[in-house]
Amino acid sequence: MARTKSNTTTDHDAIRGWAEERGAQPARVQGTGRGKTDVGMIRLTFPEYSNDEKLEPITWEEFFDEFEKKQLALVYQETTAEGARSNFNKLLSRKTVATKKAGGASKKPSAKKTSGPRTAARSAAKRSTPKKTASKRAGRAPSKTAHKR
């Protein structure tokens, strides 16, 4: 099967053109905005294919205001693997797109500290503490045959 190529853009005219060619319209997800001036989460919706009642149409101006405020980019495909016109699209942060293009991990680094004086002290304490054997955990004396070689 052929792979499809994804494109990324922040160009408003390119986004609107791609969407309108496919009958997509700008929309917001109801209940995701904070206050009267916050549009909330935005999407490109395909009314012909979608009947999601939580999506509310908005103007292109509202869409692009939110798009810029949240520093988004559109990842989209022109065609499917079979060569048909594709409606695939995803709005991602520009930072996420830049990280993926650079080949970096998209996940946040772990907060677990792996070095430093406190970590070194803990490691040393663990090494010097004898491990309990199964018999000690059970509260009985170790058997005489255990550990004989």
Image: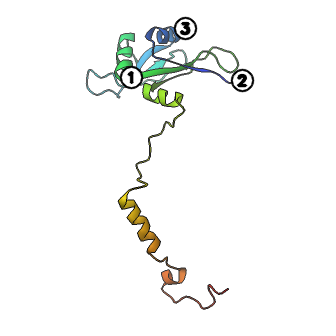
- SS for dot 1: loop
| In the image, farthest residue toward the bottom | 144
Residue at horizontal 48%, vertical 27%? 98
Q: Identify whether 113 is placed above or below 67.
A: below
Mark 1 belongs to which amino acid? Gln
Alpha-carbon neighbours of circle 2 within 10 Å: few (<14), some, or many (≥20)? few
Residue 39 in view: yes
Residue 2's disc number: 2
Q: Identify which residue is drawn at 43% across, 68% down.
A: 124
Would you say 54 lies left or right of 77 here?
A: left
Q: Where in the figure is residue 109, as x and y percent of width and height?
A: 44, 43
Q: Please report the residue visible at 51 percent of the width from the left and 37 percent of the height from the top.
A: 105
Residue kind at label 3, given as amino acid type? Glu
Residue 88 lies, in percent from the top left, at 56, 21
Distance between the alpha carbons at the discs numbered 2 and 3:
24 Å
Distance from the alpha carbon under mark 3 to that under mark 1: 24 Å
Which percent across, then down, holds residue 125? 41, 70
Q: Quadrant of the C terminus?
A: bottom right
Residue where numbered disc 1 is placed: 71
Query: Which residue corresponds to mark 3?
Result: 21
| Front one among 57 and 121 | 121
